[in-house]
């Protein structure tokens, strides 16, 4: 019985690795994505919180796909449990392929779990995180929505972790809301210099600073 369980676990891991490679390869081929590192380099030996503009369900996939392989598998997206546990395939992709930190987005569904504690636990385990500080997809004309307080709370919980702004350019045109078939278009993933919460910095000041750092990465052709 134990041998059969071990075999199933091994097959599940192989399937997850294979699917992860396939998803990353498809994303890179579809978008011809180009990573751009500004004032920062990939580093598999550092814990980081990549905070990203959010325009598509494919955002974290594209970011994940451009990370070096070793860093990719130690980087965990923070995502909504209600979406990724909706059916068996999504659960497998969310939990096994991407090893997501799945959080409940409503107080009723949390059952006492604290999303900040979940993220802190993942960081303590050596993982980096991908988070979306807007809290929801931006489907309007504004370049970037106001940030929620979660990014401040996790920075306060683990002040030594680097917060890296990441701007994903053009993905909203590849996979617009409601589209079932993606459109092949070139995309960029632009990484900015890391920030850290200053000891005496209040919440509003940090949110403004973090948001401006992300907006500064926008390609000039997109700016007002």
Image (spheres, rainbow, N blue to C red):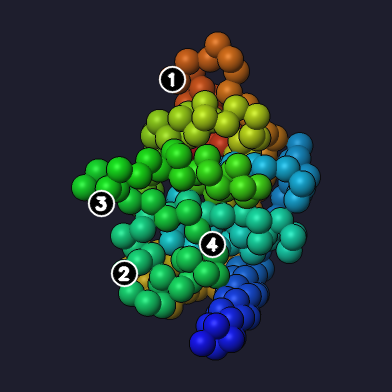
Q: Secondary structure at mark 2?
A: loop
The image shows residue 222 at horizontal and vertical percentages of 54, 45
Q: Nearer the viewer, mark 2 or mark 1?
A: 2
Q: Examine the rendered structure and indicate whether residue 56 appears above or below residue 154.
A: below
Q: CA distance from mark 1 to mark 4?
A: 31 Å
Residue drawn at point x = 37 percent, y = 72 percent: 179
Q: Examine the rendered structure and indicate whether residue 11 appears above or below residue 43.
A: below
The image shows residue 104 at horizontal and vertical percentages of 33, 51
Residue drawn at point x = 75 percent, y = 51 percent: 44
Proximity of marks 3 and 1: CB atoms separated by less than 8 Å: no
Dot 1, crowdedness within 10 Å: few (<14), some or many (≥20)? few
Q: Secondary structure at mark 4?
A: loop
- Residue 82 in which image quadrant: bottom left
Residue under pointer 4: 99
Left or right: where 106 falls relative to 184: left
Which is more N-terminal, label 1 or label 3? 3
Residue under pointer 2: 86
Left or right: where 204 falls relative to 168: left
Q: CA distance from mark 3 to mark 1?
A: 28 Å
Dot 3, crowdedness within 10 Å: few (<14), some or many (≥20)? few
Q: Nearer the viewer, mark 3 or mark 1?
A: 3
Which is more N-terminal, label 2 or label 3? 2
Proximity of marks 1 and 4: CB atoms separated by less than 8 Å: no
Residue drawn at point x = 51 percent, y = 22 percent: 206
Residue under pointer 3: 109
Which is more N-terminal, label 4 or label 2? 2
Q: Nearer the viewer, mark 1 or mark 4?
A: 4
């Amino acid at each position: 019985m134990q041998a059969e369980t071990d075999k199933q676990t091994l097959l599940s891991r192989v399937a997850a690795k294979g699917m992860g490679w396939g998803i990353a390869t498809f994303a890179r081929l579809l978008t011809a994505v180009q990573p751009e590192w500004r004032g920062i380099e990939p580093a598999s030996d550092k814990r980081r919180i990549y905070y990203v503009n959010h325009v598509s369900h494919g955002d974290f996939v594209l970011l994940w796909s451009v990370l070096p392989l070793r860093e990719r598998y130690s980087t965990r997206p923070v995502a909504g449990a209600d979406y990724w546990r909706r059916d068996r395939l999504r659960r497998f992709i969310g939990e096994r392929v991407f090893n997501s930190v799945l959080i409940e987005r409503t107080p009723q569904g949390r059952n006492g779990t604290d999303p900040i504690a979940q993220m802190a636990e993942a960081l303590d385990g050596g993982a980096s995180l991908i988070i979306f500080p807007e809290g929801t997809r931006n489907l309007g004309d504004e370049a970037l929505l106001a940030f929620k307080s979660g990014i401040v709370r996790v920075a306060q919980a683990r002040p030594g972790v680097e917060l890296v702004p990441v701007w994903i350019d053009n993905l909203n045109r590849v996979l617009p809301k409601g589209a079932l078939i993606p459109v092949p278009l070139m995309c960029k993933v632009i990484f900015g210099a890391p920030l850290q919460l200053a000891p005496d910095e209040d919440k509003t000041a940090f949110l403004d600073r973090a948001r401006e750092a992300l907006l500064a990465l926008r390609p000039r052709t997109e700016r007002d």
